[in-house]
Image (spheres, rainbow, N blue to C red):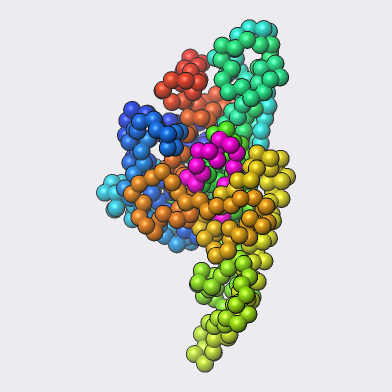
Amino acid sequence: MNMFGSSQFGMPRMKPLSSKRSHVVSVLDIGSTKVVCMIARLTPRQESQILPGRTHHIEIIGIGHQRSRGVKSGVIADLDAAESVIRLAVDAAERMAGLTVDSLIVNVSAGRLASDVYTATIDLGGQEVENSDLRKVLVAASNQSQRHDRAILHSLPTGFSLDGERGIRDPLSMYGDELGVDMHFVTAERITLKNLELCVNRAHLSVEGMVATPYASGLAALVDDEVELGCAAIDMGGGTTTISVFCEGKLVHTDAIGLGGHHVTTDLARGLSTRIEDAERMKVVHGSALANGGDERDVISVPPIGEDDRDQPTQVPRSLVTRIVGARIEETLELIRDRIQKSGFSPIVGKRVVLTGGASQLTGLPETARRILARNVRIGRPMGVSGLPAAAKGPAFSTAVGLIIYPQVADMETHASQGGLIGSFGNGTGRLARMGQWLKESF
């Protein structure tokens, strides 16, 4: 069963879930550190106070993860290596779930993710707002965002305005002279997406949809109040760190920088002249982003880099490891702080920041982040799914879980292309369903 339609501009597009039926959803998180495949059964659930936006209960029935090869800072660097790791991860998940996968939802961290808001207005002439007017204004906003070298991953109407009055959630049937919309577009370079899709295709699988990594990890790690009041989710991965800002229940901004946990490891390997895998182990066991009084006295033995048995391990004070780790972590957090500041979304983020992703597990990171970002910081783990094995309950699996949550919110998006608007919305009631009606009527 393919839940996606293909849009006219070559990007796979999701069809929304039916709130009446159960679905099996398969996802692939292609990261610089690991590749994770998850298969989940989504069963319709009653409206509830806990995670009210979720229409389905999620149970993980299969999971496979492999150490990543052929992926550098989220970019496919070696097709063969990446393809074989994808096959292994998918195989393991299929065996556990007892079913085969033919298409998956895949994340995108690279491709210079960009976030832009386009505003469009149309003249109503004092009439009431009809479906066709909504369609017209959304197409007008979307037409501004068309670029041949970039593909749209997400397009979300973040708010409507009538006669200059902003903040209107549903303008249908209201009267006015001028209707406006703010549309948030998340785009990535087409070439990067093509190579990502090629890699999945070579493993004899098809891509059902692509989701920006920051959107996915935010969906998994943030609670409703944070999403409603305004909050930033910072996903610290191996090769990239991504940021997403949510407000009033919607994704309003995303960004990504090419720094992550792997950079800390290579700094250690260089600074202590030891092998990458030894540096990784030292980071996990001894690494901390915070200096500690006893660090000068504690001594760590560093395995030599050569193959010669006569080479003795060198002894270094733990404080040296802390200094190397701390320097890179501070640089990463300062970059993120500046990016949030530059984006103009700093007031919306307010005091709320959630750190997630594998690299967020480093000792002392929340304290360092509190100091540099000058905000409240908590570590976010994937929420609202059952059946996750203990090893996959940590922040390193937020993106994969977010990809599984995504189909439930895919209907908030509208997709426009040269051929008009493509989008499909839930078949429930309310604004999204009414928009669904006008889409059906339009074609």
Residue 64 shows in this picture: yes
Residue 234 shows in this picture: no
Q: Position of residue 219 (x, y in %)?
A: 50, 42
Q: Position of residue 172 (x, y in %)?
A: 56, 15
**Residue 290: within the magenta?**
no
**Residue situated in front as seen by the camera: 116 or 12:** 116
Q: Position of residue 188 (x, y in %)?
A: 60, 42
- Residue at the farthest bottom position: 310
The magenta segment is: 219-237
Which residue does the image show at 55% across and 24% down from the upper left? 421
Q: Please say if 373 is above or below 289.
A: above
- Residue at the farthest left position: 98
Q: Please say if 27 is above or below 274.
A: above
Residue 138 relative to residue 285: left or right: right
Residue 2 relative to residue 129: left or right: left
Quadrant location of residue 173? top right
Which residue does the image show at 62% across and 33% down from the upper left? 184
Which residue does the image show at 53% across and 30% down from the upper left? 413
**Residue situated in front as seen by the camera: 265 or 341:** 341
Q: Where is residue 90 in the image (x, y as percent from the top left)?
A: 37, 52
Residue 125 relative to residue 357: left or right: right
Which residue does the image show at 49% across and 23% down from the upper left? 432
